[in-house]
């Protein structure tokens, strides 16, 4: 569990270590990026963590000094420099809610929008957790991956405060039933830590409520543990409903 995720969830009144407590398995912050999520990104796999003073670019991003960020980039600063937890300036700008710095960083053609920090998080995941739809859109426009192995942006959005991010990510092709390393789905996160609307959006889109994580918990179990009995009943009913076969064509929604 990263300090970012813990702080945001704690501020919203959720359990501090949502990913560990919800599934009983270790989190990416403990194990590091696993499989393709780490190996497929050279900056995450090979770039050594920063030691010593924090790079000036990250300080400027933290303080939302957009002009300073741009000046540093033009002077040759590495846009993908990172701190001891492999957070790049993009991670920091999203975490600290620094819109001017974020805009400046996204103008750099060399910035790695898919950089993975030590906890296995990308800037898009953090933006989704913050409920910042416009930031998610800007990151994806620059090439941020909606789907990747392990914890995904949809998992984070489902635990966040803005159901519009959940809806938008689904529209961008987010895998509805993607599994975290401990088997948790976005629907489980919404049921236990997000809101009723996010869970309903996921169910309407076809998320499988019958799936179980490594602790054999369903989305309904997450809802019951969170005291959301009505949602739990709705999820139980959804889990029993017949699911369309792979050959059944889906109705195309009008734009």
Image (cartoon, helix red, strand yellow):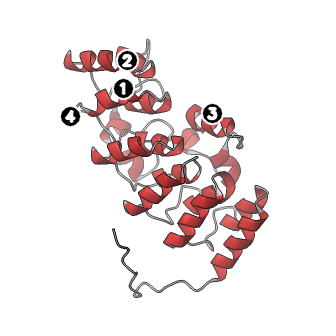
Residue 39 in the image, given as x and y percentages of width and height: 36, 47
- Give the residue displayed 47% in from the left and 59% down from the top: 167
Q: Are marks 1 and 2 in contact (CB under 8 Å)?
A: yes
Mark linked to residue 215: none
**66 or 149, nearer to the observer:** 66
> Label 1's element?
helix
Q: Earlier in the sequence, mark 1 or mark 2?
A: 2
Tell me if residue 3 comes above or below residue 240 in the rendering.
above
Mark linked to residue 100: 1
Q: Earlier in the sequence, mark 4 or mark 1?
A: 1
> Label 2's element?
loop
The residue beneath circle 2 is 65
Q: Quadrant of the C terminus?
A: bottom left
Q: In front: mark 4 or mark 2?
A: 2
Q: Earlier in the sequence, mark 3 or mark 4?
A: 3
**155 or 21, nearer to the observer:** 155
Q: Are marks 3 and 4 in contact (CB under 8 Å)?
A: no
Q: Residues within 10 Å of mark 3 (few under 14, many from 20)?
A: some
Tell me if residue 179 comes above or below residue 239 in the rendering.
above
Q: In front: mark 3 or mark 1?
A: 1
Mark linked to residue 109: 4
């Amino acid at each position: 569990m990263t300090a970012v995720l813990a702080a945001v969830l704690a501020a919203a009144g959720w359990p501090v270590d949502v990913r560990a407590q919800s599934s009983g398995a270790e989190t990416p912050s403990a194990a590091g990026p696993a499989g393709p999520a780490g190996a497929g990104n050279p900056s995450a796999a090979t770039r050594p963590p920063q030691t010593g003073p924090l790079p000036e670019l990250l300080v400027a991003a933290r303080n939302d000094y957009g002009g300073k960020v741009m000046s540093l980039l033009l002077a040759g600063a590495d846009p993908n420099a990172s701190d001891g937890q492999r957070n790049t300036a993009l991670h920091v700008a999203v975490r600290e809610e620094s819109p001017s710095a974020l805009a400046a960083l996204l103008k750099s053609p060399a910035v790695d929008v898919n950089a993975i920090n030590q906890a296995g998080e990308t800037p898009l995941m953090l933006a989704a957790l913050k409920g910042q739809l416009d930031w998610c859109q800007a990151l994806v426009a620059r090439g941020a991956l909606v789907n990747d192995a392990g914890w995904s942006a949809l998992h984070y959005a489902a635990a966040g405060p803005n159901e519009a991010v959940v809806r938008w990510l689904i529209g961008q092709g987010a895998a509805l039933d993607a599994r975290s390393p401990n088997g948790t789905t976005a629907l489980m996160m919404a049921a236990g830590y997000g809101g009723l609307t996010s869970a309903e959006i996921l169910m309407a889109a076809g998320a499988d409520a019958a799936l179980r994580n490594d602790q054999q918990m369903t989305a309904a179990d997450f809802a019951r543990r969170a005291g959301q009995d009505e949602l739990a009943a709705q999820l139980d009913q959804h889990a029993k409903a017949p699911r369309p076969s792979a050959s059944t064509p889906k109705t195309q929604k009008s734009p």
